[in-house]
Image: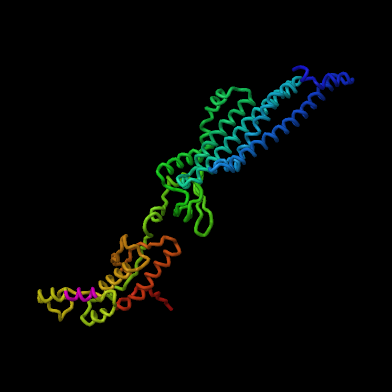
Amino acid sequence: MMDFRHILYDYLISAGLSDTSAKYLNMIGLTIILLIVVFIIDYIIRKILVNAFNVFAIRSKSNFDDILVQNKVPRNIAHIIPLLILIEFVPMIFYDFSYFENILEKGLQVFGIILTLWVVRSLLNTIKDYLKTLPRFKDKPIDSYIQVFMIFAWVIGLFSAFAIISGISFWKFVTTLGAASAVIILVFKDTILGFVASIQVSINDMVRIGDWISFEKYGADGDVIEITLATVKVQNFDKTITTIPTYALISDSFKNWRGMQSSGGRRIKRSIILKAQSIKYLTNEDIDKLKRIQLISTYLETRQQEINNFNNEKQADKSVLINGRNMTNLGVFRKYMQTYVEKHSAVNKEMTIMVRQLAPSAQGLPLEIYCFSTDKRWENYEYIMADIFDHALAAVGYFDLELYELNAVISE
């Protein structure tokens, strides 16, 4: 071993160099030789591992090995053997320079920690990418859990590196840092909150990747494209990106449209406001006129017969319309819109369909149409809703009803 340490030293001494010069030149020469050898070994091992993984990935049916190569797992693993060679031979080369030997040994140990973290990170990224290809995990916040593992790994790695550099044992170093735990908690406050929030979001299944959410506080209205430990990214419908703190999902209120998307339809709930003064009882002439509307002609025949039979039985004085039972233009219009919506081809017939009156207001009487469109896509949904209300607004006049419009009074 001594011969190897001074393989160049003996030659340089015999060539007439001083002891100090021979030692330095011996160290420099052996360092260059070691670096060249390590570089060659690293190159050969890297090529062998990468090619072996590529061949295996081509033959394998699973795409896990392809993702391993994409995340440079073989390349990072290939650096381990050259690093071990350096750790083994550095003490021999710097035998006569204990100060540099100590620094280099600590540097290589720290680099070993960093290399280990690289390997762990590439493996975790591989697992993350692979799980995202599986339908069962595609909408899960995998990024959050990967980040949690990496945070713990980096913290342990940093503690280990500081312990090596300072010469203090790892556990003693960690114990010393316990006194600074309050500062550490303050620094990592958002990370801790995000970690807790990620667990609650996942366990309670509050948000998944691909969900449409509305979060007024942060101006978000769109699809969730990424869930990480600290943030949730939402791509709004105007293609802008809104970033929301993960812990805001459990501390604030937001709307998740997943229930609508997974249901049989998207809700339509909108009103038209009618003038109260235009509501009236229908005379027989009015009813005969409305019978020409095909959707309600049968209904009017049956309903008129029922009312006439009741009024005759009760001997109601019909010279005054309010006596006995009567039909109103509002009631008939409501029945017409109910029938029209029920027969609309884009309305889900298996979900609630209702045309109802809301409480009268100072503006008039709101008549609300409540139903669900079969097509849940935004642009088609808006078209279906507009089609229904185009017809409703145009049909009002046929029933001698009037829409409320605010007339602004301009003072001169």
Circle count = 0
**In the image, what residue occupies the spot 50% across and 56% down?**
236
Instruction: Answer with left or right where residue 400 lies relative to residue 305.
Output: right
Which quarter shows the N terminus? top right
State the image quarter where residue 307 is shown. Answer: bottom left
Q: Is residue 324 magenta?
A: no
Front-most of 341 and 218? Answer: 341
Front-most of 394 and 304? Answer: 304
Q: Position of residue 405 (x, y in %)?
A: 37, 73
State the image quarter where residue 82 is shown. Answer: top right
Instruction: Answer with left or right where residue 358 lies relative to residue 262.
Output: left
Q: Is residue 301 magenta?
A: yes
Front-most of 224 and 171? Answer: 224
**In the image, what residue occupies the spot 57% across and 40% down?**
65
Instruction: Answer with left or right where residue 200 lies relative to residue 280.
Output: right
- Give the answer, above or below, for where 67 lies relative to 405: above
Q: Position of residue 49 (x, y in %)?
A: 64, 36
Q: Position of residue 260 (x, y in %)?
A: 39, 56
Q: Which residues are magenta?
A: 298-305
In the displayed orientation, state which residue is furthest to the front: 59
Main SS, magenta region, reads helix
Residue 366 visible in the displayed image: no
In the displayed orientation, state which residue is furthest to the right: 16
- Give the answer, above or below, for where 346 lies relative to 33: below
Which quarter shows the C terminus? bottom left
Q: Position of residue 145 (x, y in %)?
A: 50, 39
Residue 319 visible in the displayed image: yes
